Image (tube, rainbow, N blue to C red):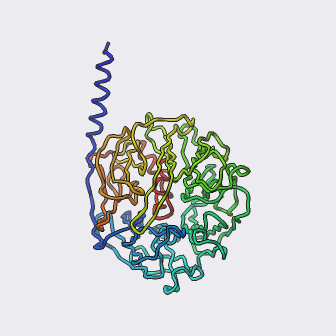
Amino acid sequence: MMSKYVIICLFLLANHIHAQSFDIKTILEIDLGVPVGQLRAVPVNFKDGSKAIAAMYSEDAEIDPYIGMFFFPKHTLKIIQFTENGSVLWKRDLGPGVVPGVWFSPILAFDLDGNGDDEIWIINNSDPEHPLDYRRYVIEKVDPQTGKTLGQWPWLQPTEGQSMSHMYRHFILGAYVHNEPVLIAGQGTYGDMYLQAWDADMNQRWKIKIPDTIKGAKGSHVTPVVDINNDGIDELLWGERCIELDHGTQLFCGDEDTWQGHSDIIEPVLDYENNSWYIFTCRESFNNQSPRIVMYDHLGKQIWGDLDSGHIDTGWAARIGVDGAPIVLGVKVGEKVRTAEGERRTGIVENTYEAFSGKKVVLGFDVYTSIPVDLNGDGIHELVKGYFEGDGSLLDRNGNLIGNIGGLAAMASKFTSHPGEQILSYSRDGKIRIWADKNAIDSERAKKRYAHPFYKINQKQTGNGYNLFTLGGL
């Protein structure tokens, strides 16, 4: 029988070999030719099977509509689209009428008209001399082959008289209702909120208002689309509200009678064994209602909660537990500051749990600023510190350092033909890079993830809100 010493040595050796098995390399580099302060990107698919990436960027750092974070831009917002092999298809400058910031200007790639090519969807301004005149904002359909405008329609109008932070919160989403594509627009997060759906011909399918005075939750910075009840109709998790996207009807609102605040993070987590969804939330500190970290079931019933107070500013679900079991993270912060140089947070406290039981877990390493990504295709996540003030470090599930992407991440999913998932990074010097594991082999578990409808639709949300983490629960 092996001694305990030998078993421990073999375990450590196995971990060392696993950590050394990664071969993280840059497989593509694009030089934008200007410094980059912000960048978001989405995968673009064409009917011939080819793939591209549309990236929206500016030299300015992210501009937030909150008065303590807003600053006047010195540069414009631009779009570049290039193939997975690096061929630039087109570039476009959106001009002075579009404010560079994800809450003003999301981007989506989604095939609404059913021709097999993802159209590019943005918010533009028909009055470029007045960049804050929301009355002239339009949702624009862009030809993915040329970057030319294919059509414009009026954008959702906010309730007048609100603060800037309430009025300039924009989302563009794609979804399916019995396999029919539906385009969703969202406006607002903290006060009056509006949602609108269009069909393939851009006819209004429905429109709803969620008034500030209604009981229950506000919106979130994360907007997952999920078929929560497996009936073939996608739902939108708008904060703790679950809204079916056929008619815009609310199915439920988690803690409707006891939670009237805003949750920074809303993330579905799939229980594969029972084919049932859970909903993980991290709450901001608008009021003193507790708990601050909550897990719901697929009907909006609270399963467990933790922490009585605090601003839980970010978090995720990741398959980094035993045999890929889901772990959830909620990060409590003290102060958050955004300037023209970027943003930073102080007073960081990480809280990690087994997703379904709520049992506290000690990971033994720091995961703040990280995004889950399965680089080697084994169905278990690695982590890239590519968010907020992340330093670009790549960690395996045990916290071993396996590389560095040299910047921040704008996508972390399978968006090229290379095995495993990839990371699209950007750095201040204007370089976009795609990172992959040269040793990656897609396991059956990973292939099942890639093929899941939730993966396909939410993979396209990385140009929208704070949706870089959304795939982690799958």
Judge whether residue 474 can be spotted in this image. Answer: no
Compared with 90, 319 (above or below) is: above
Task: Point out the image quarter for the N terminus.
Answer: top left
Q: Nearer the viewer, residue 382 or 179?
A: 382
Q: Position of residue 315 (x, y in %)?
A: 50, 49
- On screen, residue 56 versus residue 247, left or right, reads left
The mark tally for this picture is 0
69 to the left or right of 393: right
Q: Is residue 284 visible?
A: yes
Query: Dividing the picture into quarters, in which one does residue 190 lie?
Result: bottom right
In the image, is residue 313 above or below residue 22?
below
Seen from the viewer's position, the closer of residues 272 and 362 is: 362
Q: Residue at x 47, y 73 (%)?
A: 71
Rendered location of residue 115, percent (x, y) = 48, 70
Query: What residue do we see at 38% from left, 45% from top?
Result: 382
For the view shown, which residue lies furthest in the top direction?
Answer: 1
Q: Position of residue 8 (x, y in %)?
A: 32, 23
Query: Looking at the picture, how far across and down is residue 418, in whole percent?
Result: 32, 54
Location of residue 431 by image quarter: bottom left
Q: Nearer the viewer, residue 99 or 246?
A: 99
